[in-house]
Amino acid sequence: MTRRFQRFAGTDSERLADLNQLATLPAETDIVLAVRGGYGVSRLLEHIDFSRLGASFRARPQIICGHSDFTAFQLGLLAQCGTITFSGPMLAGNFGAEEMDEYTWRHFWRALSEPELALSWENDAPAMQTSGTVWGGNLAMLISLVGTPFLPQIDGGILVVEDINEHPFRVERMLLQLYHAGILSRQKAIILGSFNGTTTTDYDAGYTFEEMRKTLQQRLNIPVLSGLPFGHEPQTVTLPLGAFGELVHDGVTSRLTLSGQPVLR
């Protein structure tokens, strides 16, 4: 894309038209991919025609995929329309890489073609089992929607979050905001995806991401799992936001089975 205005991929009006035009896509369109993240969706949210988009997607479900800043649009669709979208690889950073990660590629196509999608990963946590609506995405963008009509009001859900270049204390602060807002206590489980791009120092004196997770776990009466390869990394799963999920952890391996998401026709 060569169109540009300041740091954005066009003026607000141009970018808004791009999003609203998703309601009039030709019938042969199978997949809509975000090009990249950054910043910009927040400037558009109150002007997006969610009602028209929701009606279009109910009549003809679409595969819409992206992450990072795109999370705001995805959560807005889920909140306003109940539309399921996919948090996963994007055109520039993933598909446009010199060599796309094979795991990411394979899981992307599995997610878009399997009505019942199962993924598993290892982490150290007590055995548990639960189910609920899977939602979340980029943590910073989710936080930016608290108190707005664009944050889904989900009770009994499985919240999956990720971010990049955020020190563990910043991640803790954002998660505590969700805790103080009463959002975490309404969930059945929390899954922490990839949180890379930062390092601890001597000043942290043993304060690590895992210590942060333990601190959060002590405050909550629900499981807080980690280790899912999901987010701003070359290797990532593709996760349907708004799908139904069944989460089982046997003490060593976690397994999340997802259903109800749109798949390729």
Image: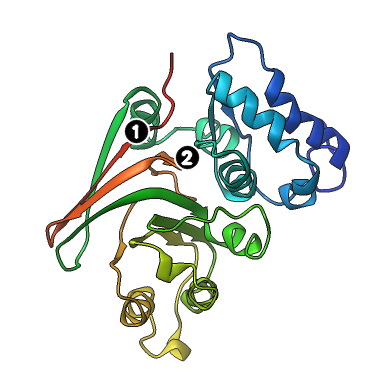
Please give left or right for residue 68 compared with residue 185 in the image. right
Identity of the residue drawn at 61% across and 57% down? 141
| Nearer to us in this view, 76 or 212 | 76
- Image location of residue 56, percent across then percent down: 63, 23
Q: Is residue 11 visible?
A: no
Q: Which residue is mark 1?
A: 107
Circle 1: element type:
helix
Q: Is residue 178 above or below residue 83?
A: below
Q: Is residue 159 visible?
A: yes
Judged from this view, the residue extending furthest toward the top is: 28
Tell me the tag on residue 67.
Answer: none
Please give left or right for residue 150 compared with residue 199 in the image. right
Q: Amino acid at mark 2?
A: Gly
Q: Amino acid at mark 1?
A: His
Q: CA distance from mark 2 to mark 1?
A: 9 Å
Q: Which residue is mark 2?
A: 88
